[in-house]
Amino acid sequence: MEVKNLYFAYNGNIVLKNINLEINLGESVAILGENGAGKTTL
């Protein structure tokens, strides 16, 4: 999976900005962060 320059705003608040991510077949990734950091949105 590959994501380039992802941007997402919710109710006028920028949640994700300029996110780039590449996950290759067989790799595992953990998304860590504070509440409201955009983990679920990603």
Image (cartoon, grey):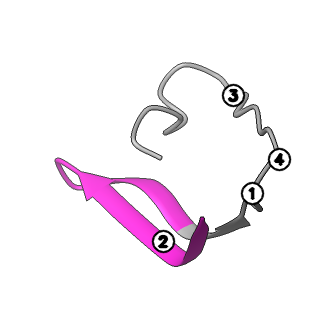
Q: Which residue is mark 4?
A: 27
Segment colored magenta? 1-17
Is 41 placed above or below 22 here? above
Picture disc at residue 33: 3
Specify the farthest residue to the bottom: 5
- Give the mark nearest the N terminus, 3 or 1: 1
Residue contact between numbered discs 4 and 1, judged by CB atoms under 8 Å: yes
Secondary structure of the residue carrying tag 1 is loop
Residue contact between numbered discs 3 and 2, judged by CB atoms under 8 Å: no
Crowdedness of circle 2 by 10 Å Cα count: few (<14), some, many (20+)?
A: few
Secondary structure of the residue carrying tag 3 is loop
- Amino acid of disc 3: Gly
Please tell me which residue is depicted at 48% across the width and 71% down the height of the picture.
Answer: 6
Secondary structure of the residue carrying tag 4 is loop
Please identify the dominant SS of the magenta region.
strand
Is 38 placed above or below 36 here? below
Q: Which residue is mark 1?
A: 25
Q: Which residue is mark 2?
A: 6
- Asked if residue 10 is among those painted magenta in the image, a careful observer would answer yes
- Amino acid of disc 1: Leu
The CA span between labels 3 and 1 is 24 Å
